[in-house]
Amino acid sequence: MNKIADALMSLLDNDGRFEIRRNTIDMDVSEMAKDSNHFKADIHVAIHSNAGGGEGTEVYAFGPETKSERLAQALYRQVAPFSPGADRGVKYNPALLEVGNRVNATSALIEVGFHDNALDQNGLYRVHQ
């Protein structure tokens, strides 16, 4: 996930319109939320890999008809075409630290794939039609 975050940071940094910040490798999810709040971020995007026998990308939002959902939908449209497997879509879970009440910013959690699935793990990506 850090390589993905590094690539994203590079793209955003080159744009010049954004003040960006990312976590350090030693931070846990709670510390990342606190850091985001301290930074007074407008947008908080978490990037993870999933587990549990599934495949493909999904993006979590706080709830339907929220800024979080709009962010999650926009991210999903950009990330999902690179994901192998089934279309998992945007899901809602306000209990997740990454998108819940612990993060003040509009937030979304990208689950880029399942690290316990060989197709996702090996990076054999296909483009959704």
Image (cartoon, rainbow, N blue to C red):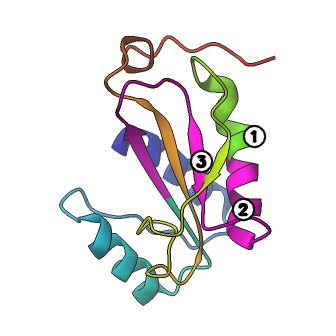
Residue 78's place in the image compared with 118, above or below, is below
Kind of residue indicated by mark 1: Arg
Q: Which mark is residue 53?
A: none
Tell me which residue sits at (62%, 50%) in the image. Answer: 91
Residue 97 position in % (x across, y down): 41, 69
The crowding category of the residue bearing disc 3, from other C-alpha atoms within 10 Å (few below 14, some 14 to 19, many at least 20), is many
The C terminus lies in which quarter of the figure? Answer: top right
Helix, strand or loop for disc 2 = helix
Query: From mark 3 to mark 1, how far is it between C-alphas?
Result: 10 Å
* Residue hosting label 2: 69
Residue bounds of the magenta highlight: 46-75
Ranked by sequence position, the earlier of labels 3 and 1 is: 3
**Relative to 97, does residue 120 appear above or below in the rendering?**
above
Q: Position of residue 101 (x, y in %)?
A: 49, 81
Q: Measuring 45% from the left and 25% from the top, which residue is drawn there?
A: 54
Disc 2 to disc 1, C-alpha distance: 12 Å
Q: Is residue 4 within the magenta segment?
A: no
Tell me the crowding category of disc 2: few under 14, some 14 to 19, or many 20 or more residues within 10 angstroms, Cα based. many
Viewer-nearest of labels 3 and 1?
3
Mark 1: few/some/many CA within 10 Å (<14, 14-19, 20+): few
Dot 3 falls on a residue whose secondary structure is: strand
Q: Which residue is mark 1?
A: 77
Q: Earlier in the sequence, mark 2 or mark 3?
A: 3
In the displayed structure, would residue 113 be above or below residue 64? above
Q: Earlier in the sequence, mark 2 or mark 1?
A: 2
Which quadrant of the structure image shows residue 12?
A: bottom right
Q: Can you tell which mark lies on residue 59?
A: 3
